[in-house]
Amino acid sequence: MPLFEYSCAECGRRFELLMREGVMPVCPACRSEHVEKQFSAFAVGASGAQASPMPAGHACGGCQNPAACGFGNN
């Protein structure tokens, strides 16, 4: 299931939802169906040689404790 970001036209709240095909998104705060799909920060990024590298650290690229994520036994 894809994760989408929405903004509610009624109360202004921004939220994320895992969406199944054919399901209408509803604002979790006010239950309004007047929501607009937003561009995800994940989908917007740099490209080419100017792109930021993965964070320094371990094989998973993000944690500071490799034993906790399963990469500590290398």
Image (cartoon, rainbow, N blue to C red):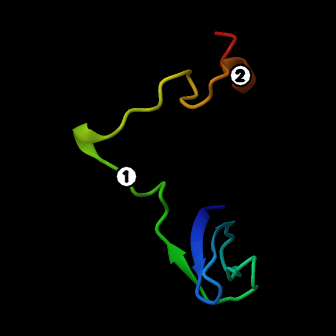
Indicate the amino acid at tag 1. Answer: Gly
Mark 2 lies on a secondary structure that is: loop
Q: Is residue 50 left or right of residue 53?
A: left
Report crowding for label 2: few under 14, some 14 to 19, many 20 or more residues within 10 A (C-alpha).
Answer: few
Location of mark 2 (residue): 70
Residue sitting at x 58%, y 87%? 9
The percent coordinates of residue 62 (x first, y second) are 57, 31
Figure quadrant of the C terminus: top right
Would you place residue 47 above or below residue 5 in this image? above
Location of mark 1 (residue): 45
Query: Of residues 32 and 17, which is closer to you in this image?
Result: 32
Indicate the amino acid at tag 2. Answer: Gly
Q: Nearer the viewer, mark 2 or mark 1?
A: 1
Residue sitting at x 53%, y 29%? 61
* Mark nearer the N terminus (2 vs 1): 1
Residues marked 2 and 1 touching at CB (< 8 Å): no
Mark 1 lies on a secondary structure that is: loop
